[in-house]
Amino acid sequence: MRKHIIITAVSCLAIGALCGFVFKPFGAAEDIQIQYYKYANVLQYLSQNAVDTVNISKVTETAIKSALETLNDPYSEYMPPKQKEAFEEAFRGNFQGVGIRFGIYKDTITVTCPLIGGPSEAAGIQFNDKIVKIDGISAIGIKQDSVPLKLKGPAGTQVTVTIKRVGNPDLIDLKITRGVVPTSSVEGAYMLDNSDIGYVYINKFAATTTDDVIRAVQKLKKEGMKKLVLDLRYNPGGYMTEAYRLADEFLKGGHRIVYTKDRNDQIREQYYSRDGNSLEDIPVVVMINGGSASASEIVSGALQDLDRGLIVGETSFGKGLVQQIFPLNDGSGVKFTTARYYTPSGRLIQRPYKDKKQYLAMEGRADLKEGANLDHTGESDSTRPSFKTLGGRKVLGGGGIVPDYVIKSDTSIAKFYDSLARKGVFWEAAEKFVLMQGQTIRTKYNKDLKTYLNNYTVSSEYLTVFKDIVKEKKLEWKEVEFKADEKFITNSMKYMLAYYMWSWSDGSFIGALMQPAQLEKAIKLFPEAAKIAKAK
């Protein structure tokens, strides 16, 4: 079966070397030229005749932003060079540098975490080390944005940092050989206790996601994995290529996984599965919620439509649009929607987005009662078109991916938790405590995330730091409400601490960990997942 070159949700598409402008006639070429010269004339008039000095670059950026705002597109965006570079790096799957997380405290670079297996850890950098010099030049007072420029560099090159370490009266010079630092999108991969069930959490779909999952699964198979929970909760998406590749790992050959249509409703690309992949015979339960979007919905939608596994949790975000980044000549770029994608049954799962505020507020998602929804008869919205899965089950288009089994999120029972979370107490307390005890804790658990999650309990020292932050923010400590919601609060503290120690790239995994009841119920649904797979 032929497979086409894929268009990605966050890919960069070069449209020509731009010195001035290069025209690509999406509409009438003559009209585009007229509008181009009209704008060029305005810039010339302003630069030559305005009474005050004109920042032409700022004028152009404002014009681009205004142009994108005229589109009925919630994802159109102008990206300045640094933002575009950071965006692309986040999805590349690795970067070249020294591999640390840091903050600026009292004008000094402070290491909040050496990345596991990175060059800095290999060189001996520890939590709370203060970098006072870089290559012999004082780094005191350096700006946050300037630090990566000093520390990053091609793999194989070296940088010397001079550090001040708590308990050591002398400054320490450490030479770090820069390397390729992996940023795996698999933030959790381990066997669930006393079972043959493996658990894999994916935080986004980056360039290496499928390879990351395959490596994790190979390890879990050696540990006895016979079934898999694939957790896509809070996963906002990413490369469409990786969504297609990951879904393919679960499917036998010959199935259409996803296809895209352009503004003329013509099919642009379509992608089919192939035989011989690593997860074709593994029973799978896929977990989703309102934070699961785009590439996450491609995977869950394909497995649902093809009756390959059970989709559990809450209705996904509802994003069926494909974006591309078009690079500009100064390193900036414009991102906007270029196509819509459809699941194997023909569903467009995109929610209405005419009102952008309502769309981004997640209005229009199906909110069903908890329980089985295998035939999707509980979805009574007559405005949504109906489709059939490979096994003949009913599913609806629009409004996101609705689970086959609805499991509601855990919720805090006290307003006290919410008041602390809104003020950032959890983040600040974890950051402060990791600077105090991070090295000791990660060493104790031998860098093993699962052991930490199973065994670590919030210490009295950590709780004291937490209460101190509450006091600093002039909030009231309510002991009665704390006791009523103690498990939820202390679990949140525990997960925030792990965010720093295990170098998680964002907080999505924390959100998933804070919903343990969803996972506990999901693992009981493998018999239903097997029934669906056999019925197709």
Image: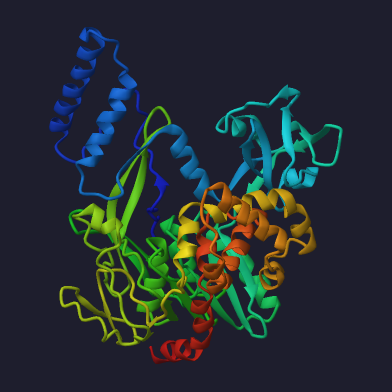
284 displayed left or right of 364: right
Q: Is residue 500 above or below residue 346?
A: above
Whether residue 40 is visible here, answered yes or no, is yes
Task: Write the residue at 51% across / 79% down.
Answer: 517
Whether residue 1 is visible here, answered yes or no, is no
Task: Write the residue at 70% across / 38% down.
Answer: 178
Residue 511: x %, y % from top left: 50, 64
User: Residue 433 versus residue 81: which sits nearer the camera?
Assistant: 433
Quadrant position of the C terminus in the picture: bottom left
User: Residue 172 versus residue 92: which sits nearer the camera?
Assistant: 172
Residue 364: x %, y % from top left: 24, 67
The total of numbered circles placed on residues is 0
Task: Write the residue at 44% across / 87% down.
Answer: 533
Name which quarter of the figure residue 342 lies in.
bottom left
425 displayed left or right of 392: right
Name which quarter of the figure residue 105 lies in.
top right
User: Residue 87 versus residue 358: which sits nearer the camera?
Assistant: 358
31 displayed left or right of 295: left
Q: Is residue 2 above or below residue 433?
A: below
Quadrant position of the N terminus in the picture: bottom left
Residue 185: x %, y % from top left: 55, 58
Q: Is residue 395 above or below residue 507?
A: below
Residue 230: x %, y % from top left: 52, 73
Name which quarter of the figure residue 305 lies in.
bottom left
- How does the figure colour the protein chain or chains? rainbow
Q: Residue furthest right?
A: 169
User: Residue 154 versus residue 271: which sits nearer the camera?
Assistant: 154
